[in-house]
Structures are given as C-alpha cells and as structure tokens.
Amino acid sequence: MKVLHEISEVRDARKQCKSTLGLVPTMGALHEGHLTLIRKSVEKCSQTIVSIFVNPTQFGPNEDYEKYPRTVEEDLKKCEAAGADYVFLPTNQVIYGTEKPLVTLNVDKEMTSILCGKSRPIHFNGVAQIVSILFNIAQPDVAFFGEKDYQQLTIIRKMVADLHFPLEIVGVPTVREESGLARSSRNRYLSEAELAVAPNIYKVMNIIKEKANSLHAKNETVPVETLENEAKKMISELVPGSKIDYFEIRSTNDLKRSENLAADSRIFTAVYVGTTRLIDNLYIGK
Ligand code: PAF
C-alpha cells in the first residue's frame, strides 16, 4: 500500500490504474464501518484508494473539528489490512490552498434545512465541496459511502447526477455493534455509562418499525407524527441524559415528509447522548 500526499501522486496512480478505481472518502478514525466500505471497494474494483482528510469546511464554528479523533498510524494499518492499494493523506493546504475559493457548492435549502441540516446549516455544503474535490482529484469509477449518513448519501447521489460526475455511487449498509449501536468515530467520546444506554436508540427505532408494520398489516392509517412522538418519549426515558435533535419518518428516496406512513418510509434520528451527537436511520417501508 502506498501513502500519497500530493495531488500529482494521486493523478499518477489514477493513470497507472488501467481498470476500475474505487474511492473510499473518510475522515479517518477508522472503524468496522469504514473497513466494510474498503472491503466492498476491493471486491468490486481492481484498485482502491482511501482518502483520510478531516475536512474543516463541513464543521460549524461550535462543532468538534479540533477535537475530531485523529489516529493516522492506526488508520494506515487498518487500510492495508483491508486491502487498500493507496491512501491519500492530504493537508488542508493541498486541498484548499491558501486563498479563499471563489467558487463553492451550495446544496439546495430543501435538503440543508431538514434533519442534520437544521442544526448543521453549512455541513452539507462543505461535504459537497470536499467530495467533488476528491472526485476531481482521484477520478474514481466508483465511490463508496455508508448508509449511516443517509442524508449525506442522498445529497451526494443527487450532486453526482446534477453535475454529471462520471462515476457510480455505492451505498453500504450501516455496520452495528452487537448491541445495535451504529458504528461511528464519535462513539469513542461516549463514557461507559453513556455506552450502556446509547443502544436503546436503535431499540426504540425497531419498536417503532414493528409498530408501524403491525398497524399497517391491520390496514390502519399510520400518522407519522404519532409514531415520532411515541419514539421521542421512549428515548427520553430509556436514554437518560439524552437530548433529541430530531426523530423523523421521511421518504427513503427524496427525504420528503408525508402525513401518513408512505411505501418507502425510513426513520431518521439524531440524539445527543451527553455531549456526543449520534445519528442513525432505519428503513421501515409501509
Ligand atoms: O462521511 C464522512 O466521513 C465525510 O463526510 C466525508 C464523506 C469523508 C467527507 O468529508
């Protein structure tokens, strides 16, 4: 496995790769979720490049950019063991230069004012910017993203279609701990007590899914707000010290809301457990 720091090195690697190149963009602090993305790429593509870059433009002023875990040495070992051919490890200077960019990307308010966008208004513009920069640098045939960040995945798919990026986006199902807790780099911020209660978020999501499915089996109309309120009450009780950012049921395809459960409904949630913000989602269908 080769570690690349410069754009010219990535471009050379791209030129040398005569068949499919897979890109796995990450911010490091790699866990089983990321390694699943890398393994998927290794399986599907002839060569795989992992990027590790904690992207400053997707963090708001009061978010955890400075504190975000940086574990490069361990990450490199994990990438190699998962079968990556290259790791791209750029500095801020390599990606953004020293001057303020004149052209940036703006994701439509329709997407950035809902779910995670509500409390992180600049986040998805920063994600769109860095992902498109990485696509332009590596020119992959396929890029892999986790379904855990479902809103991000939806926005990236639409961006690729809107801007005609010549590549395929593969979404990979969320990897969970045995307890059900979705793997996340931020789980390492959780104290033991918080780790013990955080899996209850996924438990509540499943209770709501089952309830929705059984009501639907009885041909009852299912107002999503009733289910959402029930879920919020359960989370407040089962996850002491938590603060719910949102718990919403929306369409899997376009993240739109409808009054009653739709054919492609999905649960989306973000909950602060202590000071750590955890997100998750679960398909419920109808
Ligand atoms: O999902 C992430 O880790 C980041 O948002 C991404 C896609 C690597 C862009 O910085």
Image: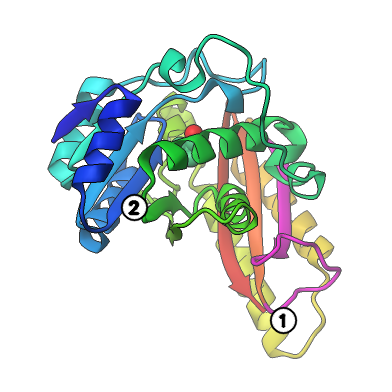
Q: Please, what is the three-letter code of the amino acid marked with disc 2? A: Glu
The percent position of residue 200, horizontal first and vertical second, equals 53, 49
Please provide percent x and percent y for residue 238.
60, 45
Determine whether, in the image, residue 105 is placed left or right of residue 6. Answer: right
Q: Which of the numbered marks, if any, corresponds to residue 215?
A: 1
Q: Is residue 206 left or right of residue 3?
A: right
| Horizontal side of residue 268 vs 24, given as left or right | right
Q: Secondary structure at mark 2?
A: loop
The residue labelled by disc 2 is 178
Identify which amino acid the numbered label 1 is placed on. Answer: Leu
Crowding at dot 1, Cα within 10 Å, few <14 / some 14-19 / many 20+, comes out as some
The reply to whether residue 70 is visible in this rendering is yes
Instruction: Please name the residue shown 59% across and 23% down the image.
Output: 57
Q: Which mark is residue 284?
A: none
Q: Residues within 10 Å of mark 2 (few under 14, many from 20)?
A: few
- On the image, the x and y values in percent for residue 115 come to 72, 46
